Structures are given as structure tokens and as C-alpha cells.
Amino acid sequence: MRLDKFICKSTELTKTQAVELILEGRVKVNGDTVTLESTQVHENNDITLDGKELVARPFRYLLMNKPADTICSNIDEVYPSLFNYINEGNNTELHIAGRLDADTTGLVLITDDGRWSYNIITPAKKCEKVYRVGLRNPISEDAVDIFTFGVQLQGESQLTRPAKLEIVSEKEVLLTITEGKFHQVKRMFSAIGNKVISLHREKIGEVMLDVEVGEWRYLTDAEVTSFKQ
Ligand code: URA
């Protein structure tokens, strides 16, 4: 990671303060003074500030049950940020691995480990996300095959990846997808002439939602590791 980021992760300093200290020549990496804030460093490097060794805080991995009318952003906008529910400190370092719309509820994974969240978000890793979807109209018989084949979303050059549709009842389905295009689920049902009226994410990879609305917990080591393969 960048040297200025490392300093933020190992102190309570802001990025601006970290950059100032680096420019003042007060930071050493493996014994050498480094004055370029973008220098790439590794946590195993010996990094000191005014001669005092810095140790980065360990990465954090959380899951949360997102309430409706909250946004997956670090700052409040029209709706409040869901980070208001997490009284953990250093919240600005955290980000959401796969954001949900303001009106969507359910499972969000939150971390400060960008490599880890990449494994969840990138379609290349085929990480499955399961949504419980409420529909305005009865689901059509052929929807299962259409979603398996892939649908053409407006403005996209490629079909959606194969998706699994399980019919729960006439107007309720479970949809499993391995990508996360903008408003993907809503657009998939729109493409087959239906409309999503409720959307709730229940599962990501092997991680099931198991906390109440607005609650959060740390992931277990096994859950964290399950996204590293
Ligand atoms: N697809 C959507 O349309 N909205 C979400 O919030 C998540 C997936």
C-alpha cells in the first residue's frame, strides 16, 4: 500500500497530516528517509515516524444487515449512510464490497482490505450473490431458461452471465448472480417485462445473513478466508 495510507492505518493521523510528515523527512522505510507519499510499502517493512516504529492496524471484516432507506456510501446524502450503524472508529477507512441501492435491504460485507473486496466484486472470481426478489407480476415460465442463457440489459454490450432463478411463489423468487452491474437485478427483471418491488440480499459466497436489521458482526476467520481462494 502507499506510504501515506500506511501511516493513516497505523496512527490516528489524517492523510494530509501523514503527507506533511513524509515531506518533512520524518518517515523512514527500512532505515532510509522517504519523502514521496506514494511510495509503495509492505506491512513487513520497518517503517518509523520520528524513530518510533509504526504497526498497521489489522484489516477488519464485517457483515451487516442493511436497513431500507440507507445508502452504501461513507457520507450521508439524501438517505443516511449505513456507516452510522457502525460505532467502530476509523470508519472512513472502511468500504462496502458490493453496494446495494438505497431501497435494497440485507447482506453487505464491509472491510478496509481492498484486495479482499476485489475477490467479491470482480466477475472473474464468480462469487455468488443470492437475492430474494419480490415481483409486481407473476414470474413467467420461461424466465428460468432466459436467465440461465443471459439477458440483454439496456446499454450493455454483453449478455448477463448465467444466473440461477428459483421460484418460491408466483411473485417471489431467489436469484443468484455472479456479477454486479448497476441496478443489475432490477434491470434483469425489467428486461423480461416484470418489475422488482422488493429486493433483499441473503447470501454472498458462503456467508449467510444472520443478524437483525441494522445489526452487524465481525466475520469469522473461516468466512474471511473463504473469499481469498
Ligand atoms: N441489483 C439491483 O438492482 N439493486 C441492488 O441493490 C443490488 C442488485
Image (tube, rainbow, N blue to C red):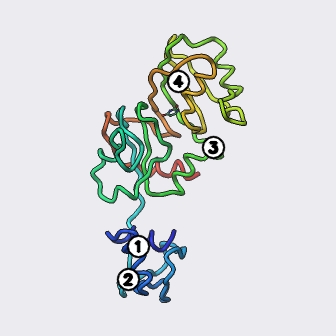
Residue beneath disc 4: 174
Pointer 4 or 3: first along the chain: 3
**For this view, does 210 lie left or right of residue 143?**
left
Pointer 1 or 4: first along the chain: 1
**For this view, does 47 lie left or right of residue 145?**
left
Residue beneath disc 3: 123
| Badge number at residue 49 | 2
**Secondary structure found at label 1:** helix
**Secondary structure found at label 4:** strand
Neighbor class of circle 1 (other Cα within 10 Å; few <14, some 14-19, many 20+) is many
Residue beneath disc 1: 7
**Secondary structure found at label 3:** helix
* Residue at image point 37% right, 41% down: 64
Q: CA distance from mark 2 to mark 3?
A: 40 Å
Disc 1 to disc 4: CB gap under 8 Å: no
Quarter of the view holding residue 153: top right
Q: Nearer the viewer, mark 2 or mark 4?
A: 2
